[in-house]
Image: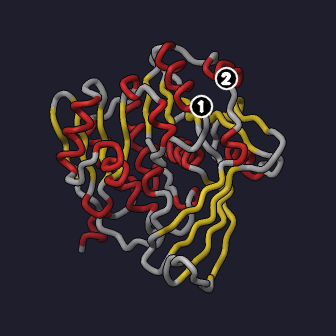
Amino acid sequence: MKVLCFGSLNIDYVYKVNHVVRPGETEKSEEVSVNCGGKGLNQSVALARAGMAVSHAGMVGKDGKLLLDQCAENGIGTQYLRMIEGRCGHTIIQVDNEGNNSILLYGGANQCMTRDFIDEVLGGFEKNDVILLQNEINLLHVIIDKAYAKGMQIYLNPSPYNEALEKCDLRKVSCFLLNEIEGEQMTGETAPEKILAAMHERYPSADIVLTLGKDGSLYLDEHGMVRQEAFPVKAVDTTAAGDTFTGYFLYARSTGMTAKNGLELASKAAALAVTRPGAMDSIPAMEEVICHSWEEDAL
């Protein structure tokens, strides 16, 4: 079984602020850093640091050598990455004193996928291989259709939620990984159990993973629901917490772990990620997750 993450690669410009800027306000930034990110790349890195052999498919602009180098350094397969004219996707991220963030996204090269490129990439994969998707690249509906036609297992993080997802036949998705906001956007419900019920009613053959921040996470499939409490830590930056959770959960399921054990592992990895600044740089390696003293944190 091969694992492919087909998604975005961004350069993140991260600004440390006292509070997220309001309309019409000018706010002083205490710090600024330039990092590699993008939901797609973050999730590939999480998979790789968990110990999964993963290839990444996507496009970068002429300013994207840093992104290609980071993929190689993290052991991510780069045979499906292409450099094109123009600029990379990038974000402007504000992180406040409480670790909360606000993100402005420019698509750049991430919005330059073509049908020929999709065919080229998926030509290297077969039935039961795994594809992990987000919603920061164009032609997502085409990728889902073509991956489904090949019999691949489709894991989707429907973020950011927008009109592009309305083009997608989401009945073809094997597993949804979403947070409370995306759950409400998809179902109109706000209570976690109602979000799960509405998702299951619409997509009865899919597994549903719902992350709830400090309130933990939930999993639902045809056999029932599993709940996982969050691990208590002091948050510094929540930017890549969801991506870390997604990568570690997919690793767990792809290696035969139960949903319960997968939620626990992913929750631990995400908890470590929020204690560190940055996006990709905050994602822990498996050894850190295993060796961390969670009992001491609870005291």
Q: Secondary structure at mark 2?
A: helix
Mark 2 closeness class: few <14, some 14–19, many ≥20 residues within 10 Å: few
| Residue 73, placed above or below residue 125 | below
Q: Is residue 242 left or right of residue 197?
A: right
| Residue at 44% in and 42% down | 158
Q: Quadrant of the C terminus?
A: bottom left
Residue sitting at x 48%, y 41%: 163
Question: Which three-letter amino acid code belongs to the residue tagged 2?
Answer: Arg
**Rendering coords of residue 186 (x, y %):** 34, 43
Disc 2 target residue: 115
Q: Amino acid at mark 1?
A: Leu
Q: Earlier in the sequence, mark 1 or mark 2?
A: 2
Tag 1 near tag 2, CB within 8 Å: yes
Residue 202, given in percent of the width and then of the height, sits at: 27, 30
Looking at the picture, tell me which residue is in the foreground, 273 or 91. 91
Query: Which numbered dot is residue 125?
Result: none
Q: Residue at x 71, y 48 (%)?
A: 108
Residue behind mark 1? 139
- In this rendering, is residue 77 above or below 8? above
Number of callouts in the render?
2
Residue drawn at x 67%, y 36% as measured from the top left: 58
Which residue is situated farthest in the left direction here? 224
Q: Is residue 69 above or below residue 230?
A: above
Helix, strand or loop for disc 1: loop
- 88, 273: nearer the viewer: 88
- C-alpha span from label 1 to label 2: 8 Å
Left or right placement of residue 157 versus residue 58 in this view:
left
Q: How is the image coloured?
A: secondary structure
Mark 1: give few (<14), some (14-19) or many (20+) Cα within 10 Å.
some
